[in-house]
Image: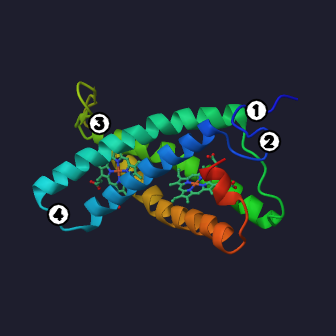
């Protein structure tokens, strides 16, 4: 059988596209999350708040576009098996948390867009690109706001767990898990 194109030749690693997909979405997602938490918890001047909100929305839309592309790539090509000797409970936990992270990378920007445009605000992106306001629909904007805040909070724990697991594999188990996502 042909080796799927996102895998290394031996079928045990991530290919270049899968790795670029992972790091583009991961970095943009963490930037959007950091900005979102800053907007929520820091006592910002109105001008700084407006500036940060603008970047928060733009980066969030990048996460949506890159996240959809990545999801399509992953569904088409699959993912390699876990590194050999990983206990089965860890394989199951990792698989569930990867699915949750993928879902969050679509749900977070989508709920952000829905709550903004149905509060009657347009979203100005770089250059001529913008998403128009769709009017005022309170229940829809409110529901999306709840999803955004709830999934945002879960995401902090999920990313914390994900990064801690990657570091544990690298520094304690000393296996290939992190290396194969960095260098392939
Ligand atoms: C990966 C993408 C995103 C992440 C991780 C993220 C995360 C967050 C977080 C953690 C907050 C603070 C929530 C709270 O505790 O109430 C927040 C607030 C907010 N986000 Fe996002 N966000 C993302 C994308 C977007 C997008 C694409 C938009 C709109 C275009 C958006 C619009 C907003 C707005 C308007 C708020 C303030 C909410 C309020 O007024 O209560 N976000 N975001
Ligand atoms: C510094 C931060 C991060 C590190 C060190 C890291 C590390 C890794 C590693 C080592 C793997 C491979 C696991 C395996 O082979 O079983 C992986 C996979 C994965 N990571 Fe991350 N990650 C980070 C941030 C993120 C973020 C923010 C997301 C959220 C979207 C994310 C989502 C995923 C997903 C969905 C997978 C499964 C493979 C795929 O579909 O690309 N990661 N990560």
Can you give x and y, in whole percent of width and height, for residue 96 in the image? 68, 56
Q: Which type of secondary structure does the marked residue at label 2 adopt?
A: loop
In the image, residue 13 sits, relative to residue 168, either above or below, namely above
Left or right: 19, with 28 as reference point: right
Name the mark on residue 11: 2
For the residues labelled 1 and 2, the Cα–Cα distance comes to: 8 Å
For the residues labelled 3 and 4, the Cα–Cα distance comes to: 24 Å
Of residue 104 and residue 7, the one placed in the foreground of this image is 7
Can you give x and y, in whole percent of width and height, for residue 128 in the image? 23, 24
Can you give x and y, in whole percent of width and height, for residue 17 in the image? 60, 36
Name the mark on residue 4: 1
Q: Nearer the viewer, mark 2 or mark 4?
A: 2
Read off the residue under disc 3: 117
For marks 3 and 4, the one nearer the N-term is 4
In the image, residue 44 sits, relative to residue 134, either above or below, namely below
**Which quarter of the rendering shows the N terminus?**
top right
Residue farthest to the right, as pictured: 1
Read off the residue under disc 4: 44
Residue farthest to the front, as pictured: 183
For the residues labelled 2 and 4, the Cα–Cα distance comes to: 49 Å
For the residues labelled 4 and 1, the Cα–Cα distance comes to: 48 Å
Q: Which type of secondary structure does the marked residue at label 4 adopt?
A: loop
CB contact under 8 Å: marks 1 and 2: yes
Q: Is mark 3 within 8 Å of ligand 1?
A: no
Q: Residues within 10 Å of mark 2 (few under 14, many from 20)?
A: some
**Can the viewer see residue 37?**
yes
Give the quarter of the image for residue 137.
Answer: top left
């Amino acid at each position: 059988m042909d080796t799927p194109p996102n895998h290394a030749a031996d079928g045990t690693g991530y290919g270049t596209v899968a790795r670029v997909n992972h790091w583009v979405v991961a970095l943009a997602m963490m930037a959007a999350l950091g900005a979102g938490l800053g907007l929520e918890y820091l006592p910002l001047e109105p001008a700084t708040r407006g500036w940060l909100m603008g970047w928060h929305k733009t980066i969030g839309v990048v996460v949506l576009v890159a996240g959809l592309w990545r999801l399509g790539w992953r569904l088409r090509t699959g993912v390699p098996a876990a590194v050999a000797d990983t206990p089965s409970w860890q394989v199951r936990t990792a698989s569930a948390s990867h699915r949750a992270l993928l879902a969050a990378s679509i749900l977070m920007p989508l709920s952000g867009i829905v709550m903004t445009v149905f509060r009657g605000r347009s979203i100005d992106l770089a250059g001529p690109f913008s998403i128009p306001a769709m009017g005022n629909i309170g229940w829809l904007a409110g529901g999306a706001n709840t999803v955004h805040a709830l999934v945002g909070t879960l995401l902090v724990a999920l990313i914390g767990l994900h990064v801690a697991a990657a570091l544990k594999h690298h520094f304690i188990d000393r296996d290939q898990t992190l290396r194969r996502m960095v260098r392939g």
